[in-house]
Image (cartoon, rainbow, N blue to C red):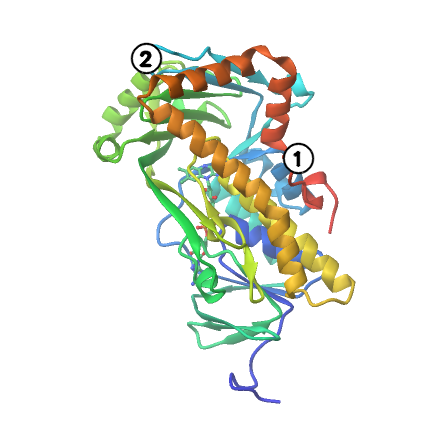
Amino acid sequence: MPDKYGDHAESPAAIVVGGGPAGLTAAIALASGGLATVLVGKRPAKADNRTSFLVAGSVTALDTLGVWELCRTQAAPLTVMRIVDDTGRLWRAPELKFSAQEIELDAFGYNIENRHLVAALEQRARALPALRMIEDDVLSVEPADDAVVVSLKSGETLRAALVIGADGRRSLCRDAAGIAVDEREYKQAALTVSFKHSRPHRDASTEFHTPSGPFTLVPLPGSRSSLVWVLDPIHADEIAALDDAALSAEIERASHSILGKIEIEPGRGLFPLGVVTAKRFGDRRIALVGEAAHVIPPIGAQGLNLGLRDAASIGELAVQAHRDGRDIGGADVLSAYDKMRRADVGTRTLAIDLLNRTLLSDLLPLQGVRGLGLYALDRIGPLRRAVMREGIAPAAATPRLMRGEAL
Ligand SMILES: Cc1cc2nc3c(=O)[nH]c(=O)nc-3n(C[C@H](O)[C@H](O)[C@H](O)COP(=O)(O)OP(=O)(O)OC[C@H]3O[C@@H](n4cnc5c(N)ncnc54)[C@H](O)[C@@H]3O)c2cc1C
């Protein structure tokens, strides 16, 4: 029977809004579990030149979903992580070196350019019969008691029992669900660029802790690496405005030439930093994943790893509800989802915020606490191993896909 949206509204089980890495992963998870799913995403206004370091659990999930085999050759393993105190302060921390072998792993994870990861996700998504992909803008999302109605710029209308809001930090879905956020801006910006270098990286990342924030070098395949350089915004603008030769020289200087001569590649990014956390991760038949649910600074490379765990979790809960004959967008599914994700997101946001504050602080006691913490990590074996394991496979959040179990 026609309703107020006309009789042309398509009714999949779930609609994913947003075709970034978190939305694509959620759509693939739902469709792989047998749920008829539509993903609606518009192309981002600007190319994403960032890279993502994906921890071992994220790689396992992508492998289980049939995505990793499509991009593994474009990813570089990370077997060693170094943290170097480059603050020049009185209370300096010792240099820390973590090896994946210490926790019986071949690698902590892999670093990959976002464009390759998204291309592999899109390729996999297009191959799934239960998944329809639409490239369009979502103009409105209207939740009701029994379904959510999603209207597209093309004029098409869709309705489903569950909507996944994967539409990034300014999320229309989050507003439609009536979910407020806690938000704080940092007086920092991150400059990103990839580059070639003359010395080998030996599959090791190096994080220099500087008074403005971390300067992190992460390996890419071959003699290439990516950089995330956290700076105060004015300095960031100045550095981002340098020509290629001057920026290459500046990066070589700041990295103490550990990678030798540097030649930057086209495509720089500059990102203002801050924290955004949704007060709830789901309501009114809408579940939030990725940056629609939480934004954290790119310190410790956790953001997308959290987003992939969101996608795996809502996929698992919705597929299970469907198999049990329950409503996949029901309040029980959304509150289970919120419970499943809250501790993981909360602890990582807090840890990154604390680390960043102790780096920026001019207060000697705070610098001392940071130095002592890193000293303990250096010396106490079980603590080192527990922190390493927690970094790659959090005890509070191991959805089935992260354990290699299909949905
Ligand atoms: C400098 C930097 C470095 C980082 N490095 C790492 C790292 O090493 N490891 C890691 O885990 N994380 C990292 N992150 C975090 C990671 O990049 C983000 O978590 C991730 O990109 C977010 O993905 P997403 O899919 O949630 O959002 P997005 O990539 O923002 O995707 C949202 C999508 O929704 C679409 N959209 C929005 N509104 C609509 C609408 N109305 N209709 C249709 N489509 C819509 C947009 O066009 C976009 O494609 C980093 C972040 C920064 C800033």
Residue 342 against residue 150 in the figure, above or below: above
The label number, if any, that marks residue 264 in the structure image:
none
Residue located farthest toward the right when viewing the structure as drawn: 324
The front one of 176 and 347 is 347
Judge from the rendering whether residue 218 lies leftward or rightward of residue 107; answer left or right: left
Residue receiving disc 2: 88
Q: Pointer 2: residues within 10 angstroms few (<14), some, or many (20+)?
A: few
> Residue furthest toward the front?
365
Q: Residue at x 26, y 35 (%)?
A: 233
**Mark closest to the chain's N terminus, 2 or 1:** 2
- Which secondary structure lies at badge 1? loop
Callout 2: helix, strand or loop? loop
307 in relation to 155, above or below:
above
Identity of the residue drawn at 48% across and 36% down: 350
Location of residue 174 in the rendering, given as x and y in whole percent from the top left corner: 47, 60
Badge 1 density bin: few <14, some 14–19, many ≥20, Cα 10 Å: few
* Residue type beneath disc 2: Gly
Residue 319 falls left or right of residue 98: right
What x and y, as percent, mark residue 152? Answer: 46, 71
Q: Is residue 169 visible?
A: yes
Q: How many discs appear? A: 2
Classify residue 230 as left or right of residue 39.
left
Q: Position of residue 5 (x, y in %)?
A: 51, 83
Residue type at tag 1? Ala
The residue depicted at 61 percent of the width and 39 percent of the height is 58
- Label annotation for residue 395: 1
In front of the other: 153 or 356:
356
The image quadrant where one finds the N terminus is bottom right
Looking at the image, is 305 positioned above or below residue 205?
below
Determine which quarter of the picture holds residue 254: top left
